Each structure stands twice: as C-alpha cells, then as structure tokens.
Amino acid sequence: MSHSKASFTINVDPTNPGQFFACCGLFEVANRLCPGSESWFNDEGTQFFIACGSHSLLELIKAIGQTRIESSLGDDGLKRLGTLLSVAKDSLSEQDIADKTRLQQSWYTETITLKEPFDIALDWWWDGRSSVTLLKTWAAKQFVTESIARPLLDSIKAHNWETIDVTNCLAIELPVKGLPFCFDSMNNTQNTARDYGVAPSEVKSAPCIRPLVELLTFVALQRFRPFRPLKSDLLYYATWPVPLPINVAAAVSSSCVYAGGKCFVFRMLYRTKYMKAFFSATPVPFLEFQNDQT
C-alpha cells in the first residue's frame, strides 16, 4: 500500500551500523503487524519514518516486549546440550554421546523464532555467504537464545517506555542480565581492562546496554544485509529518502538498488579471535560505493 504520512518517527545516528539496522529491524516487526508498511529516512539519514497504519511506536515497542523467543531445540534440548558440552568426553555414556551428536547437529541449524504477534524465524548466521559469516559476532559455543537474545528481550519488557520520549528509543541504555550482540558501535571496545577503565570481571552490576539496538539488529539481519565486496573486509549500507516497501528497502540497504540516500562503510572489530563487534561507519560518496561492488 502507499502511504503519504508517517505513523511515527525515530531519531537515528546513521554512522552507527547498529542503529541503522535496528531501524530495519523495527521496520520488519512493523510490517508483520501491518503488512504493506513503508519506511524511509530523511535526507541526512538522522530520522527514520515508518508508515504502518494506526500503529504507534509505543504500541510497537510494547508488542516487542510481549513476544517470546524460542529455539528450535527447545529449552530442554538447550539445557541438555549445555550439560553434555560441559562434561569431559571420556565420562559420557553411549546414550550421552548419541544425545550430544543429535543435539549438536540440530544446534548447527538452529532457528530462533520471535513468536506471536510477529512469528519471525531467524537463522541468518548459518548462511554460508561471506558477508553473513563476517556479521556473526558471538563465539561458536555461545547459546544465543539464553545468554543474549532473551536477556535483551527481558530488559525491553521490564522497562516502562511510557515515561520517555520514544522518538529517542535507540539511545536508551538499560541494565541487561546477559550479554550484548555487540552490534551497537557506541558501546564496543577492544574488550580489555584499559578500554573499560576497569577489569570487566570486577564489575558486579549488570551492564547498561541499548537492548532495542541489539535485538532489532539481530532481527534485521535476516532480511537486511550490508554489502561486502569480494575479498574485502569493508561492509556498505545505504539509507533511502523515499517511502519503500520492505523488500525494496532491503535491496536498497544492501546497495543492490540506489534510491538517492546516504552511503556508509564500516568494518568489524575483532574483540577476540572468535568474537566480533561493529565498528562505527563513515559516509562515502556513492561513486566509491558503486565502484567497490565488483
């Protein structure tokens, strides 16, 4: 459908890849509630608009807080696998080994679902394409559902969003009893004591994280992907200043189609050998953006 007026606006830092893709994730969930929704940025890329009928931003955030996150392995399967992975191999019974093999095979193709009212299935990190593999920020043995996704959702659910200006929702830091995905470039460091100013292990309170940025980016990457030129570590994305439906917007965001917006490039920060984070992005002329797509 075609919209002439936005349902709501949010402020965004377009040089923060996490905030950009969080906008895309918000568009994804809005489109599930109101199929045919459209979105666009202002010319500078500092405001994001979604036209989704009568739905307000506050209603959308509350709907996110009301959803559930489920793994295709189920809670019992995840718990059983976690137990088996923590036990020395030579102490496992034949049944334990069989269970471990079966659960690991299922885990290697795990799907995480945002349940009603969205019903969004997420498994993008298993995609073999290099740009997607590079975007996986967590270690191979981390259980994303329990250690990252659900604590982020719990934080969103616990906060009283009616007390703030939700236009700035992507800037809201909240305590999270878990880990971030490290998509928010404003909070990313080299993960050393010097970067933090203190040893992270000595910090007893829950860290303050921007849970909407982290969780919505995780959702967005199922459909919205930055473009990675062949044999390059550069990742490009672009805004769009005209109202677009979700499939067209996804193509524009990954540079497949140019719609007159701003273009940005960023790299991944290697926190450890196996864990990564998003660095901040810098604007680039579209000519450079276009020439690198080879």
Image (tube, rainbow, N blue to C red):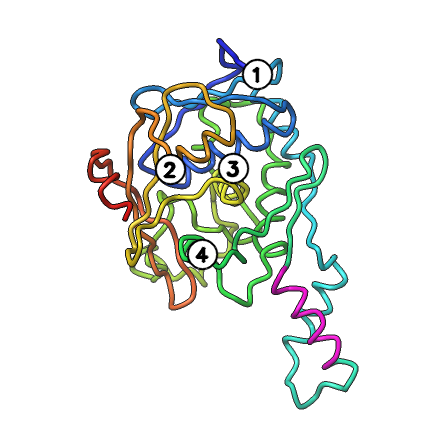
Number of the front mark, 4 or 3: 4
Report x, y in % for residue 213.
47, 39
Q: Which of marks 2 and 1 is nearer the N terminus?
A: 1
What secondary structure is found at the residue carrying circle 1? Answer: loop
Q: Cα distance, mark 3 to mark 1? A: 27 Å
Q: Which of marks 4 and 2 is nearer the N terminus?
A: 4
Q: Which mark is residue 256?
A: 2
Q: Cα distance, mark 3 to mark 2? A: 27 Å
Under mark 3, the amino acid is Leu
Residue occupied by mark 4: 129
Q: Cα distance, mark 4 to mark 3? A: 26 Å
Labels 3 and 2 touching (C-beta < 8 A): no
What secondary structure is found at the residue carrying circle 3? Answer: helix
Residue occupied by mark 3: 212
Magenta highlight range: 97-109
Q: How crowded is mark 2: few (under 14 residues within 10 Å), some or many (20 or more)?
A: some
